[in-house]
Amino acid sequence: MKKWILIAAVSFSMTSCDTLLEAMETADGIMNETTGITQGEAAQGLKEALTNGVSTGTGFLGKTDGFLKNAAYKIIVPEEVRDVESKIRSNPLANALAGKHLDNLVTAMNRGAENAMAEAKPIFVSAIKEMTISDAINIVTGGDGAATNYLKRVTSTQLKEKFMPVIKSSLDGVNANKYWDPVSKAYNMVTNKNVTTDLNEYVTDLAMTALFTEIKKQEDNIRANPVERTTDILKKVFAYADSRKN
């Protein structure tokens, strides 16, 4: 009796597996028949596009002067100091105390952000590899920024954890606080207020904002410009996305 129960259970299990596989193959076949693209191709194409975009974005920002000489992403002094920077510059005593340190501080903050970019790519690549087929299809058809929003959601916590010590090390390595202390003291002297900005947090947040902005530019570019789809799978996947949009 037990023998027959075991045989029945195995048969049922095998039948269930076969049914599941047939259902998956049928769904994929229907998608291919109606759209010309399979679920696997959608995932492969998106992962390729994202990996390329991440490599371009982190490489662009992570090079020397990727922040410092970039008008769009350059990190300038915190807002409370920025608002009275002209007063510091025009006040002989304040300028003597802080003028040259303002320039040194800006350089230090931007170098920290540039150095942190090396930490970003492995985190993004890992998230891309773990992306499900369902995620990929939703992103392909999700329109501008869909992939960037996905990466922001699944990587932001880890990115911040990785960025902060790198940026802190960079700021410490160039004695950023040495520059920040006289700047903040000059600010306090001019305004009778107290600067409380955490430089490490400030630079980390701006570095992350710049990174996701750059990745979105790469994503939107490949969606908008067919010439940027440099492989057959990219052409196929984003032509499908175009058809859904239209």
Image (tube, rainbow, N blue to C red):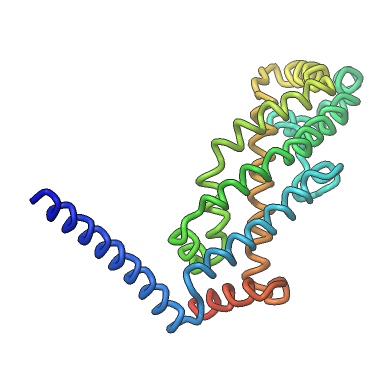
Nearer-the-camera pick, 52 or 168: 52
Q: Is residue 33 left or right of residue 10?
A: right
Q: Quadrant of residue 63?
A: top right
Nearer-the-camera pick, 69 or 81: 69
Residue 130, how many percent across, how many down?
A: 52, 50
Q: Work out whether 181 lies above or below 84.
A: above
Nearer-the-camera pick, 138 or 130: 130
> Which residue is farthest left?
1
Q: Is residue 190 left or right of residue 29?
A: right
Residue 203, how many percent across, how many down?
A: 70, 33
Q: Residue at x 72, y 53 (%)?
A: 55
Residue 148, how many percent across, how many down?
A: 58, 54
Q: Work out whether 201 lies above or below 5.
A: above
Q: Residue at x 53, y 77 (%)?
A: 240
Q: Residue at x 56, y 48 (%)?
A: 127
Tell me how many marks there are.
0
Q: Work out whether 27 lies above or below 212.
A: below
Q: Work out whether 227 lies above or below 17.
A: below
Q: Residue at x 77, y 16 (%)?
A: 185
Q: Quadrant of residue 109?
A: top right
Residue 57, how many percent across, how many down?
A: 72, 52
